[in-house]
Amino acid sequence: MFNNLSDKLDKALHVLKGHGSITEVNVAETLKEVRRALLDADVNFKIAKDFTVRVKDKAIGQNVLTTLQPGQLMVKIVKDELTELMGGDAAGINLSGAPSVILMSGLQGSGKTTFSGKLANYLKTKKSKKPLLVACDVYRPAAIDQLHIVGGQIGVEVFSDRGNTDPVAISKAGIAHAKANGYNVVIIDTAGRLAVDEVMMTEISNIHKAIQPQETLFVVDSMTGQDAVNTAKAFNDVLNFDGVILTKLDGDTRGGAAISIKSVVNKPIKFIGTGEKMEAIDVFYPARMADRILGMGDVVSLVERAQEQFDEEEARKLQKKIAKNQFGFDDFLKQIQQIKKMGNMKDLMGMIPGAGKMLKDVDIDDDAFKGIEAIIHSMTPKERTNPSIINASRKQRIGNGSGTSVQQVNQLLKQFDQMSKMMKMMQGGGGKKMMQMMKG
Ligand code: GDP
C-alpha cells in the first residue's frame, strides 16, 4: 500500500532525520521534495502546495531550527498534517435507524457489490447486526447474481426482484421486507456506470430522495487517483453523501485519492477495502494511515487484528499441549490458518514499523504458506502428532504427495523442531535459559 509515496517521503525527510543541525536551506529543500512526492502520488497541485505551506508555517511557529531534534519534529509536523488532511479522527457510520438504511453509490467496477458484502459481513460478525442486502441494479442481471453469490458466502440474505425495472420500488420493497422480517440494517447496492452520466445520477438521486437513508456511502477505486477525486465531487454534488469508501488500497502504490479526497468533498473516508476477500475491510483511521505512509508501521491495527483472531479457550489448550510436549503439526496448521485470517501477508508486514520499506521489493503473496500447508496435508495423522517417526522413505512420500522436495520437507521438519524446542523453553521458566542461549 502506498509504497511509492512512502519511499519518496522517506527520501525527502531522510536529510533531516539524521542531522543535529538543520538549516533553512535544507528545510526548504525537504519541503520541495515532500511536495514533489505528493504530486507524484497524484495529489492535486493545490492540495500539495497548501500542505507544504502549512507544514512550513508550523515549523516556523514551533521554531524547528532551534529545537534539540529538529528532524524528528519535522517528521511529526508532516505526520500531523497528513493525518489532518485525511480527516483527523476516524468516522463511524450511523446505525440508528430501525432498520438503518445504507445506500451504496459509485461507478461500475469501483467495488460496490464486493464492499456491500464486506460491510454486511462486518456488521454481522463485529457489530452483531442482522443485515439484509438489496440488489437494485436493474440493468445487469449478472450484478444481481454476483450479490447473491456474495450473500451466500457470508450467510446474509439478499433481496432481489428480477422482473422489476424500477430501482426505487425495489429498494422500498427491500426495506419493507427487512422491517417485516426483523433485519436491522439494509444495505442497498445500486447500478453504476463506467463514467458519470446524467441518467445514473438521476436514478441514484431518485432512490436517495425516496428512501432517505441514514447513511449514503460513495465507493471509489483508489487506484484511479485524481479521477477518483473528480468522481467523488460529481456524486457529492448530487447526493451530499455521508462518507467515502476507498477500495483496492492493496493495489494502490501512490495514495493520491486517500490523501486528497477529504479536502475536496469535505466528507470522511469511513472504510477501506484491501483485497477481494470478504474479510478485507478496515475502518479508516487517518492517524494510523499517516504512520503507515511515513513508514512508521501500524502496530495498533496489527495487535487489533491479532486480538480479533485470538481465542482464549484455544490458547489455553495450546499452552497445555506445549507444556506436555504434544504440540504437533495439526496445531501448527491451525496457527497458520489463524495468521492467514488476519489478512493479506504483505499488508500485515507493512504494519510492522520499518518492515514495509525493507520488504517493498519482496514478493510476499497470500500463498506464502501454501508449500508448508501442502507438506502437512500430505502427512498421516500419526506423523503429524509424532514427527519423529518421519524417516527417509516417509519424507520421500510426503515430498511426492505435496509436490515439494525431500529437501523442503527436511527444512520444515527442522524449523518445526527448533520451534518446539523454543516453545518448551519459554514454557518451563526458560526465559533465562533462552537469554543465555542468545547471548552466547
Ligand atoms: P461494482 O461494479 O462496483 O459492484 O464492483 P465489484 O464489486 O464487482 O468489483 C469490481 C472488481 O474489483 C472485482 O473483481 C472485485 O473482486 C474487485 N475488488 C473489489 N474490492 C477490491 C479490493 O479492495 N481489492 C482488490 N484487490 N480488488 C477488489
Image: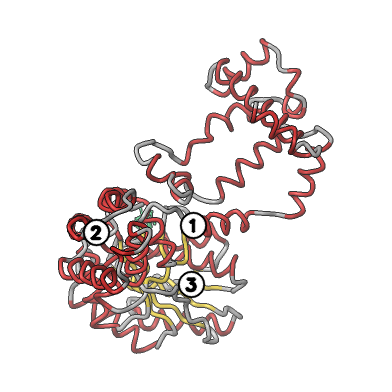
114 in relation to 324, above or below? below
Q: Amino acid at mark 1?
A: Met
264 in relation to 33, above or below? below
Q: Where is ligand 1, by quadrant?
A: bottom left
Q: Amino acid at mark 3?
A: Phe
Q: CA distance from mark 2 to mark 1?
A: 22 Å
Q: Are marks 2 and 1 in contact (CB under 8 Å)?
A: no
Q: Earlier in the sequence, mark 3 or mark 1?
A: 3
Q: Is mark 2 within 8 Å of ligand 1?
A: no
The mark lying in front, picked from 3 and 2, is 2
Residue located 66% across and 41% down the image? 334
- State whether residue 252 appears in this view: no
Q: Earlier in the sequence, mark 3 or mark 2?
A: 3
Q: CA distance from mark 3 to mark 1?
A: 19 Å
Residue 176 percent across, percent down from the top left? 50, 85
Q: Secondary structure at mark 2?
A: helix
Q: Amino acid at mark 2?
A: Thr
Q: Are marks 3 and 1 in contact (CB under 8 Å)?
A: no
The mark lying in front, picked from 3 and 1, is 1
Residue 356 percent across, percent down from the top left? 41, 46
Q: Secondary structure at mark 1?
A: loop
Location of the C terminus (image quadrant): top right
Q: Using residue 311 as the reference point, say whether residue 202 is left or right of it.
A: left
Q: Nearer the viewer, residue 140 or 316?
A: 316
Which circle marks residue 278 in the picture?
1
Q: Secondary structure at mark 3?
A: strand
Q: Nearer the viewer, residue 146 or 96?
A: 96
Residue located 27% across and 49% down the image? 15
365 in relation to 125, above or below? above
Which residue, given by chain and number where applicable, does mark 2 sit on? 224
Q: CA distance from mark 3 to mark 2?
A: 31 Å
Which circle marks residue 159 in the picture?
3
